[in-house]
Amino acid sequence: MNHTSAPASSFFLLRWLDAIAEFTGNTTAWLTGIMVIIACIVVGLRHLLGIGSIALQESVTYMHALVFMLGAAYTLKRGGHVRVDIVYRRMSVRKRAWVDVLGSLLFTLPLMIFIGWGSWEFVQESWRINEGSANSGGMGGVYLLKSLLPLMALSVSLQAIAELLRSLLLLMNIIPESEFVAQEESSC
């Protein structure tokens, strides 16, 4: 089949969705190093100088949340989420595409809808009261931290749609198996 017959909009959408995950993953990855440095400073200040800083400790929690919540879509794009790879890797490319379609439709998207919908009131209430730290001397903006829940659900949903689209394009013989395999191999 002629693989150039695919609508250009499908490829544009796929590239755009992948780019979002790449951007969020790459921009939050650098926080990991900063988080380690600040955690070491917190421990050093406490054990060597007897100085504690709630705000500094909470900043590590905020960065940790940013890395994991905003990095989840990137991890999905790179094939880093848990699945039974022993079985998956032995399947044909088309069977792997079917697993990805079913996984997106039956597990990832419903879970992200549940998380997004379920966290909405929780986040709204936090914004309404301008929620800050429960600890004296802690960081403000807890409402921003809680906003990562629906934001994570949205970003993972967008990447799940990208994975679903990529798999469907393969199953409809619009993209060649080599492109699907190349995407998987670039993820490893």
Image (spheres, rainbow, N blue to C red):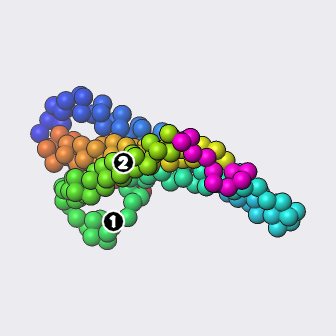
Query: Which numbered disc, 1 or 2, marks the residue closer to the eye?
Result: 2
What's under tag 1, amino acid-wise?
Arg
- Kindly identify the residue that appears in the image at 20 percent across and 42 percent down: 169
Task: Determine if the magenta segment contains residue 141.
Answer: no
Taking the view exactly as shown, the residue that stands out farthest to the top is: 8
- Kindly identify the residue that appears in the image at 36 percent across and 34 percent down: 16
Pointer 2 residue: 116
Quick one: SS at disc 2? helix
Between 188 and 26, the one lying in front of the other is 26
The disc label shown at residue 33, or none:
none
The answer to which image quadrant residue 87 occupies is: bottom left
Between 70 and 9, the one lying in front of the other is 70
Between 101 and 114, the one lying in front of the other is 114
What's under tag 2, amino acid-wise?
Gly
Pointer 1 residue: 83
Q: In the image, 188: left or right of 111?
A: right
**Residue 4 vertical position relative to residue 118 in the rendered view, above or below:** above
Q: In the image, 2: left or right of 71?
A: left
Taking the view exactly as shown, the residue that stands out farthest to the right is: 49
The answer to which image quadrant residue 111 occupies is: bottom left
Q: Which residues are magenta?
A: 129-138
Instruction: Give x and y (percent) for residue 164.
Output: 25, 47
Question: In this orientation, does residue 146 appear?
Answer: yes
Instruction: Give x and y (percent) for residue 32.
Output: 61, 53
Q: In the image, 149: left or right of 177?
A: right
